């Protein structure tokens, strides 16, 4: 199993480009996976479908395939607290990616020119891991 084709919004595509530059990422799939992780971790309510112009089409299997797809599906089931049909998985993957891209862009916009977004993400992860302990 793998994710199907998904269409990122034009705004999402622009955010993806900005985030890739900020984090010095060369591959879109890495940035999309980070955005999904950010979205599912920090979005408190079910994200809505993005409206507006269509942007880049995420090809089949780029975000998740095989065991990764199964993991992402179960992360979504856990987050939404309900079973998902296979057709719904891609819809929610895209919603959480778009949400994560929006959150990441807001965080980047809030940084000063001397701040480093990658370091900020590491500090956030450290803080959350201490809260869990």
Image: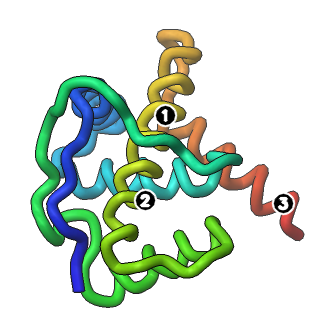
| Helix, strand or loop for disc 3 | helix
Q: Position of residue 5 (x, y in %)?
A: 15, 60
Residue at screen point 48% across, 77% down: 84
Please name whichever residue, 55 or 126, is drawn nearer the observer in this view of the structure.
Answer: 55
Q: Is residue 9 above or below residue 70?
A: above
In the picture, the disc for residue 130 is 3
| Helix, strand or loop for disc 2 | helix
Which residue position holds label 1? 104
Q: Residues within 10 Å of mark 1 (few under 14, many from 20)?
A: many
Residue 42 appears left or right of 87: right
Q: Position of residue 26 (x, y in %)?
A: 17, 45
Residue at screen point 55% across, 39% down: 119
Between discs 1 and 2, the one toward the N terminus? 2
| Helix, strand or loop for disc 1 | helix
Q: Position of residue 122 (x, y in %)?
A: 59, 48
In the picture, the disc for residue 5 is none
Residue 17 appears left or right of 89: left
Of tags 3 and 1, the one toward the viewer is: 1
In the picture, the disc for residue 92 is 2
Colour scheme? rainbow
Separation of residues labelled 2 and 3 (CA atoms): 29 Å
Residue at screen point 53% across, 70% down: 76
Between discs 2 and 3, the one toward the N terminus? 2
Between discs 3 and 1, the one toward the N terminus? 1
Residue at screen point 29% across, 56% down: 30
Please name whichever residue, 53 or 110, is drawn nearer the observer in this view of the structure.
Answer: 53
Please name whichever residue, 69 or 51, is drawn nearer the observer in this view of the structure.
Answer: 51
Q: Is residue 97 above or below residue 64?
A: above
């Amino acid at each position: 199993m793998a994710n199907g084709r998904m269409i990122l919004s034009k705004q999402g595509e622009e955010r993806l480009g900005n985030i890739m530059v900020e984090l010095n990422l060369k591959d879109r799939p890495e940035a999309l996976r980070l955005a999904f992780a950010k979205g599912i971790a920090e979005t408190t309510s079910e994200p809505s479908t993005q409206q507006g112009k269509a942007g880049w089409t995420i090809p089949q299997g780029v975000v998740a395939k095989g065991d990764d797809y199964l993991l992402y599906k179960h992360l979504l089931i856990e987050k939404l607290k309900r079973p998902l049909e296979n057709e719904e998985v891609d819809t929610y993957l895209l919603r959480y990616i778009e949400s994560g891209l929006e959150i990441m862009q807001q965080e980047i916009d809030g940084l000063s020119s001397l701040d480093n977004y990658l370091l900020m993400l590491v500090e956030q992860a450290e803080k959350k891991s201490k809260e869990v302990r």
